[in-house]
């Protein structure tokens, strides 16, 4: 079986003039389809850098990222944007919804950059909004929602293009414990339906729900 | 892949989030386009007014006018005016066989009264042939005759506005109107023609001179017979008149000459307008650029998000550029509409009209302003790094 995501010998070095900062060193990761993987590490361990590289928002100084068997090295900005759009669903700590825009329009946003015909946008968006249980909030604006609801909208938005994997960066960081658990349940439900999930967190307890834990320390995988 | 209609829709909803700011940003372009459109319409109205006045006179008309004083002072021109009835006779004597009509023309502003009503118009004195020179058409009654000229008869032929103001819808033929202390009988009424003509009261020049004691002529109008060479005829008239006056005293011009000198003045005015338009659109454009740059900074996270979700730099640039164009084009459309409304408001005074090229130009320039001043903010938005943008607080 081809892994969904492979990071091969990935290093990231920031050149700050007189000093060089090694954020990631020779990282090798392989994530299979349907896995729920947690990437754990303290602040400054390089987990955010790794998430950006895995999410194709940044390129490694050395090494390669292979997505569904396709090497992304050397891809143009446009090609990378296309892969991000169709293969990766992002969920951020601070939700990042469009201000004063309806739930439906927020979820439709990734479809606007896809090849999906506009006639299908609304149906696709409504389907994923139903999965996260916000079908009664379609016309509510983002500022009218609670933190948990906002994150559920973000999950729906990540799902709408049916990506190969969902990359969640501290998805419960801005939520209270109870709401955080609801969000995690949403991820577990998606995972049980076969979706690959990569959870980036500093919280060891949260990482326990994942099938596999990748621990980072000073830019290297330690476990 | 993102389509232009979808980008326009996104731009409209982004702008709708800050309605007051969007309106204030548009204001520069609104004022610029409004002032240009309104002024162009008024200049056009003025041009229509002049053209109306001349068009009806026919192309074979030659005018003898007092020469403009060197300093172009109308007062001095008037004082130095030596045109008299003798000149009319001279023209008749020397070129009478080449012309169909020659009439003196005296114009003075007077108030005409009928019972309790009064109308402030222009009294025009000319001979019985002036009817064809002015290109009038009868609605009621008749024009005055040769015998009225000879007898200095107190008769008038009034224009449509004069009739409307003094007599309403009634046929006024046979009624008496009073101008200063003299009573005149209304012989006929002209059909409506143009605002410049419709305030006139025509009477024999002999009667006008007798009633108001006016000696000098405003001009002499000569209508050439068909097939005459106008330039040759003008030269002959000039030579004839040199027997009565010095060459400094008068000018012989055709309608075309008058129109072209007015056109010259209007073109200078239009250039000044273009400069005003340029400056106001520049100011409006800088306003748009300023607000778009603020908007790019405010929406840095949104830019990062859109890039994470699959937008390319080109998509982001297009989005912000289209927002700038929507603002400036919107301002252009509002300015154009206000300009149109203002021409409606003054339409009773001047036949102002917005020419089609002014509409195309106003909207074209609005789009251009959006493109020029929206490009830099759009480029700076498109170049933003997605990771930095998503971290932006």
Image (tube, rainbow, N blue to C red):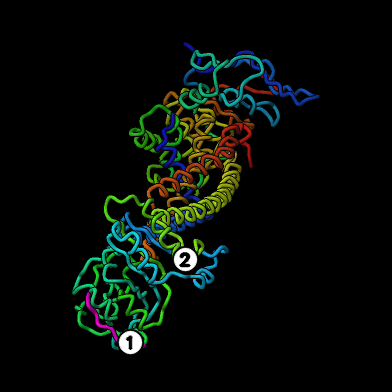
Q: Which of the two discs, 1 and 2, labels the residue nearer the N terminus?
A: 1
**Against B305, is A77 above or below?**
above
Instruction: Give the extent of the magenta segment.
Output: B181-188
Observer able to see residue B23: no
| Residue at screen point 42% across, 54% down | B257
Observer able to see residue A100: yes
| Residue at screen point 28% across, 65% down | B193
- Name the chief secondary structure element in magenta: strand
| Chain of the residue displaying label 2 | B
Q: Nearer the viewer, mark 1 or mark 2?
A: 2
| Chain of the residue displaying label 1 | B
**B210 and B45: which is toward the camera:** B210
Question: Residue B217 placed where, x, y %?
Answer: 41, 71
Question: Residue A65 placed where, x, y %?
Answer: 57, 17
Helix, strand or loop for disc 2: loop
Residue identifier under label 2: B245
| Residue at screen point 25% across, 78% down | B148
Label 1 Cα crowd, 10 Å radius (few <14 / some 14-19 / many 20+): few
Residue identifier under label 1: B182
Residue B9 is labelled as none
| B282 relative position to B353: left or right | right
Question: Residue B87 placed where, x, y %?
Answer: 39, 67
| B73 relative position to A140: left or right | right
**Image quadrant where residue B71 sits:** bottom right
| B161 relative position to A110: left or right | left
């Amino acid at each position: 079986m081809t892994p969904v995501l492979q990071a091969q010998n990935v290093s990231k070095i920031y050149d700050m003039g007189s000093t060089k900062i090694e954020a990631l060193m020779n990282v090798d990761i392989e994530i299979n389809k349907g896995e729920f993987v947690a990437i754990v590490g303290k602040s400054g361990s390089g987990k955010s850098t790794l998430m950006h590289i895995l999410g194709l928002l940044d390129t490694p100084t050395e090494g390669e990222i292979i997505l569904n068997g396709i090497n992304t090295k050397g891809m143009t900005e446009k090609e990378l944007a296309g892969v991000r759009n169709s293969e990766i669903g992002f969920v951020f700590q601070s939700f990042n919804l469009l201000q004063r825009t309806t739930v439906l329009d927020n979820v439709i946003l990734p479809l606007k950059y896809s090849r999906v015909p506009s006639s299908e946008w609304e149906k696709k968006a409504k389907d994923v909004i139903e999965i996260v249980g916000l079908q009664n909030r379609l016309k509510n604006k983002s500022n009218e929602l609670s933190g948990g609801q906002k994150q559920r909208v973000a999950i729906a938005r990540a799902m709408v293009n049916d990506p190969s994997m969902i990359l969640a960066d501290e998805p419960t960081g801005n939520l209270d414990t109870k709401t955080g658990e609801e969000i995690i349940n949403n991820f577990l439900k998606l995972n049980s339906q076969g979706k690959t999930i990569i959870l980036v967190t500093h919280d060891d307890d949260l990482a326990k729900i994942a099938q596999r834990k990748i621990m980072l320390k000073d830019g290297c995988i330690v476990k | 892949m993102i389509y232009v209609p979808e980008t326009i829709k996104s731009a409209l909803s982004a702008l709708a989030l800050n309605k007051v700011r969007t309106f204030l940003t548009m204001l520069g372009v609104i004022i610029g386009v409004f002032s240009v459109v309104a002024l162009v319409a008024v200049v056009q109205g003025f041009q229509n007014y002049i053209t109306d006045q001349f068009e009806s006179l026919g192309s074979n008309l030659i005018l003898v006018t007092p020469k403009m004083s060197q300093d172009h002072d109308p007062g001095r021109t008037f004082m130095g005016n030596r045109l008299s009835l003798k000149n009319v006779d001279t023209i008749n004597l020397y070129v009478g066989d080449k012309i169909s009509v020659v009439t003196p023309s005296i114009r003075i502003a007077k108030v005409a009264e009928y019972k309790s009503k009064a109308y402030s118009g222009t009294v025009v004195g000319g001979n019985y042939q002036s009817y064809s020179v002015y290109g009038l058409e009868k609605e009621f009654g008749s024009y005055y005759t040769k015998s009225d000229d000879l007898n200095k008869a107190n008769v008038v032929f009034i224009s449509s506005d004069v009739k409307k103001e003094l007599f309403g819808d009634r046929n006024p033929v046979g009624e008496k109107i009073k101008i200063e202390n003299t009573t005149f009988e209304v012989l006929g009424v002209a059909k409506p023609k143009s605002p410049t003509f419709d305030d006139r009261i025509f009477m024999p020049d002999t009667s006008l001179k007798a009633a108001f004691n006016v000696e000098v002529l405003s001009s002499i109008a000569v209508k050439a017979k068909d097939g005459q060479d106008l330039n040759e005829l003008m030269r002959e008239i000039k030579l004839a008149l040199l027997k009565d006056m010095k060459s400094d005293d008068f000018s012989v011009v055709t309608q075309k000459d008058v129109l072209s000198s007015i056109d010259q003045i209007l073109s200078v005015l239009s250039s000044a307008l273009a400069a005003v338009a340029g400056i106001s659109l520049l100011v409006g454009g800088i306003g748009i650029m300023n607000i778009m740059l603020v908007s790019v900074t405010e929406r840095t996270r949104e830019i990062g998000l859109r890039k994470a979700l699959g937008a390319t730099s080109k998509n982001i640039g297009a989005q912000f550029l289209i927002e700038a164009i929507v603002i400036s084009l919107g301002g252009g459309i509002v300015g154009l509409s206000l300009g149109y409304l203002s021409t409606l408001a003054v339409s009773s005074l001047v036949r102002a009209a917005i020419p089609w090229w002014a509409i195309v130009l106003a909207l074209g320039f609005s789009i251009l302003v959006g493109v020029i001043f929206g490009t830099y903010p759009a480029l700076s938005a498109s170049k933003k790094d997605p990771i930095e943008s998503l971290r932006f607080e």
